[in-house]
Amino acid sequence: MELPNYKDVFKKDKIKTKKFELDPNYKLKYSGKKYFLKTYGCQMNEHDSENIKALLEEMGFTEVEEYKDADLVLLNTCSVRENAHNKAFGMLGRFKHLKEEKKDLVIGLCGCMAQEEGVIKEIKEKYKFVNFIFGTHNIADLPEILDRAINEGKQEIDVKTFSDEIIENIPVRRVSNFKAYVNIIYGCDKFCTYCIVPYTRGREHSRKKEDILREVEALASDGYKEVTLLGQNVNAYGHDLYNDYSFGELLEDVAKTGIPRVRFTTSHPWNFTDKMIDTIAKYPNIMPSIHLPLQSGSDKVLKSMGRRYTKESYLKLFDKMKSKITNCHISTDIIVGFPGETEEDFQETLDVVNHCNYDNAYTFIYSPRENTPAAKFKNQVDEKTKEERLQILNKLVNKYFLENNKKEEGQTLEVLVEGKNEKIDGYYGYSKEMKLVNFTGKNIKIGDLVNVKITKAKTWSLDGNAN
Ligand code: SAH
Ligand code: SF4
Ligand code: F3S
C-alpha cells in the first residue's frame, strides 16, 4: 500500500517500458458480476477508462449503464477544478446510500483525485465505505488491488506519486470503432502555477515512437478513420527519449500511415515549432483544427501563471499558423479571475479574443487547487468579479463562434458520422475543422466520412444535408 506524497512529485528517472500481462489467476474470476464506471475530466481520463473497462472485462465483469444495477462501481476522477471534485464526492454519497441496501457493493475511486494527498486523507477519515483506490500511474495494478479489496475486506489504497515505467499492451476496450485516442506523452513538466495536472499525472514520459506508430498502423488497418494523439503538452514529445525526433517528426510519421484523419491535443503555445506548422500544412490528413490555449491575454498574468509566452508572441504564432495552414481553425482555453487579474488585464484577454476570433473556446473561472502556487497567492479575485468576467467573455466568444459558423453556410464539409440525431431524424458528426454538424441524408452509415452541404449556422453547431 502506497499513499500519494507530494515530495516525490519532482523525482525524475530514466523510463523503462514494460509489457502488461494479466495474472491468469484473475482471468474471468468475477464472471457474472457487473460494473459501472463513470469518467470525469479530459480525453486522457476517457482513454484510461477504455483500459480500465478492458481490464475489468478480462476479469469477467460486464458493464451496466445504471450504477444501481452494479456489483462494482468505480469513479475515474478529475482534479482540474473544484466542481469536478464536488461532482465526484457527490457521486460517492449516492454510492454510500446504495451500499446501505446492497451490503456487498464494491466501491472504487481512481484517476487524478486519487493522486491528491488531501483527497486521500479525507477518504480515509470520512469515506470508509470506499473499498479501493488506485492512481494514474498504476492502472495496470487494478486486477490485483481490486481482488485484494474484495477478499481482504479492508480499504485498499495504492497510489504511486512517482513512476519510472510505461506499461505497454494494457488491454483496451475502445468506445468507438472508427475514432481512437492514442497516448504519445504522459505527464507534464510545465507547472503552470494554477494547474494541478503536473502533480496528478507526474513527469513527462514519452512513449517510444515504434509503439505509437504500431498502434496507429493497427488502427488504420482495422478501418479506424481518425486518431487523436494525446498528451498534456504534445509539443514536448520525444525530448526525454531522442535528440533529433520530436513532435513534428512524429506527426509526420503518423500522417504517413495514411489514416484518414489525424488530430492532436493539447499543444502549448510556448514550443509550437515551425516543423509542426509545416507538417500540418503539408499533410491533408492532419486536420486543420488546432487547440492553442491562451489562458490570458495579459503579459503580467501570463508571467504569474508561468506560461512562458507573451501576448505578442502568442499573436505572432497565431498569425503564422493562420497564414501557413490552409483553412486553419483555432480553438482555445481561457481562465478568468486568476489572482491579481485587474480590469485592464481582463481587457487584454478580450483584445486577443477580438484579434483571434476563435472557432471554439473553453472558458473557466480560476479555481484554486491544492498544493499549487497560485492557490497561495494573496491577491485572489472575488467570486462576483470572476462571474461577471466569465459572462462578458462568453458573450464575446459566442459572437465569434456564430460569425465563423456563418462563413460555412453554403459550403460542403467532410463529416465523420458519429451517431444518429433522432430529433431531426438524421445524424451528427464532426467536420475536419472540428465543427459539430447535424444533418439529414439517405444511406448514411455511422463511422463513414460523408460530404455535407451546410444550410444553417448556429452558435455551437451547423445544420446540413448530405444528399
Ligand atoms: N495541458 C493542457 C491543459 C489541461 S487542463 C494545456 O496546457 O493546454 C485544461 C484547461 O483547464 C487548461 O487549459 C486551463 O484553461 C484549465 N484549468 C487548469 N487549471 C485550472 C484552474 N485551476 N482553474 C481554472 N481552470 C483551470
Ligand atoms: Fe497544466 Fe500547464 Fe501542464 Fe497544461 S501545460 S497540464 S495547464 S501545467
Ligand atoms: Fe482532469 Fe486529470 Fe485530465 S485533472 S483534466 S482528468 S489530467
Image (cartoon, rainbow, N blue to C red):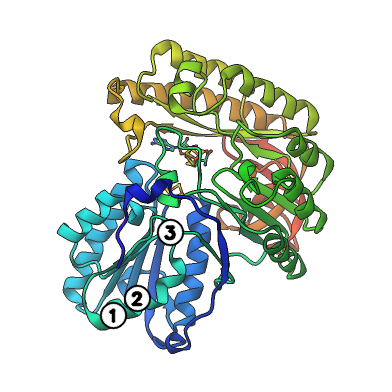
Distance from Cα at disc 1 to Cα at disc 2: 6 Å
Mark 3 beta carbon near ligand 3 (under 8 Å):
yes
Q: Are marks 3 and 2 in contact (CB under 8 Å)?
A: no
Report the front residue among 98 and 266.
266
Q: Quick check: can you spot residue 456?
A: yes
Secondary structure state at the residue bearing disc 3 = loop
Task: For label 2, count other residues whose C-alpha is less than 10 Å away and answer few (under 14), some (14-19) or many (20+).
Answer: many
Distance from Cα at disc 1 to Cα at disc 3: 21 Å
Task: For label 3, count other residues whose C-alpha is less than 10 Å away and answer few (under 14), some (14-19) or many (20+).
Answer: many
**According to the image, label 2 marks what residue?**
146
Q: Which mark is residue 136?
A: 3
Frontmost of labels 1 and 3 is 3
Query: Which residue is pictured at 78% across the width and 53% down the height?
Result: 253
Give, as a three-letter code, the residue at label 1: Ile
Left or right of 61? Residue 414 is right
**According to the image, label 1 marks what residue?**
150
Q: Earlier in the sequence, mark 3 or mark 2?
A: 3
Q: Position of residue 399 (x, y in %)?
A: 56, 24
Q: Are marks 1 and 2 in contact (CB under 8 Å)?
A: yes
Q: Position of residue 327 (x, y in %)?
A: 77, 34
